[in-house]
Image (tube, rainbow, N blue to C red):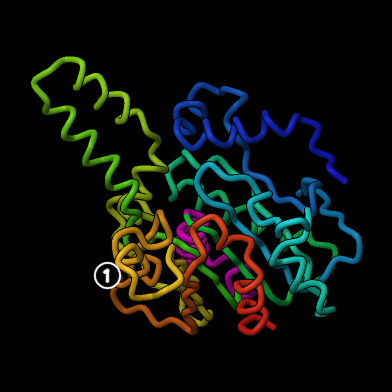
Amino acid sequence: MDTDTSPVWQRHASAILSGFLGDWLEARNNPLAVPMEFFHGRSPIDLSAPAVESPGSTLCLSIHGLMELETVWDLPGQAESHYGSLLADEGRSITPLTLRYNTGRPIYRNGEDLAELLETLIRRWPVPVERIILMGHSMGGLLIRSACHHGQYLAHRWVEKLTDCVYIGSPHDGSWLAKGAKATADLMNWAPRDYLRVVGEVIDLRSEGIRNLSRGEVVHGNEGEPPLLPGTRHYVVCGLLARSRQHPINALFGDALVHESSARGHERRGWTLSGVASFPGVDHIRLAHHPDVASQLKEWLL
């Protein structure tokens, strides 16, 4: 049952606007700035007293990407059925949760908040938490890495329970589209015509979250690049537009938003991945709700 009473169009409008201007909205206490919340099904979790039917000892949290909502995970024709719920259907004491958050905020700030919320959640969960699985689509994967860095630094208990991180179409080396927006803005700002500079200034209004996405940044600028969390399995899922791996469109555009090399973290140093899977013919958005990806996740996580 959907207990979020706001109209669907308003939720999607808020998600899109927050992606573009989320940091600006938050600074002005604008109600369109999306708060960070856990959901079970369509019901938000009350962190003061988390209550779900038949709570499991394993928590599987799915985290959406830029300008998305948790509904991006819904499998076609199966509302409220998603990767986490499919894992839970195997009867392994898994409770599937999703996260909603303001994607325009700096990724490191969202990472700090997520780490704190996870710590609160496991302390107040109705049964002892034995295992945590984190799955992130696009920006959501970068948010996972940021939360892990912050949680490890503060010696959070939830980090000890984290067994698996899955990065689905996440631009670890940056998104070519976000990089293109920056390059366009820089070019327009140097243009000799006033109206072209105005275009550049408008593009430059993009949120800090989008700027982070263009560079794959998960921590504050002066902290350096953190390694993948040790003692945890890390998996990567990549998409490709064309069904033939050798098709030139795949080299040019990847899954439409993220190149395969960026999704794999090709430029990251010292990475050891437990599994990598690429899906030719599956674009960026469909990676979040595709049956072939679901089958791969079951193979990895169950």
x, y percent for residue 286: 57, 59
Give the quarter of the figure containing the C terminus: bottom right
Q: Is residue 143 magenta?
A: yes
Q: 62 and 231: which one is in front? A: 62
Q: Main secondary structure of the magenta part?
A: helix
Residue that lies at the very extreme toward the right in this rendered image: 53
Q: Is residue 68 above or below residue 87?
A: above
**Residue 88 falls inside the magenta stretch:** no
Question: Residue at point 91% right, 60% down?
Answer: 53
Nearer the observer, 127 or 172: 172
The residue indicated by pointer 1 is: 267
Please provide percent x and percent y for residue 226.
Answer: 36, 66
Left or right of residue 46, residue 222 in this image: left
Residue 154 in the image: above or below residue 195 = below
Q: Position of residue 43 (x, y in %)?
A: 81, 47
Q: Residue at x 67, y 34 (%)?
A: 11
**Occupied quadrant, residue 20:** top left
Quarter of the rendering containing residue 227: bottom left
Question: What's the amino acid at mark 1?
Answer: Glu
Q: Is residue 154 visible?
A: no
Q: Secondary structure at mark 1?
A: loop
Q: Is residue 163 left or right of residue 50?
A: left
State which region is magenta: 139-161
Q: Is residue 187 above or below residue 132?
A: above
Q: Residue at x 50, y 26 (%)?
A: 25
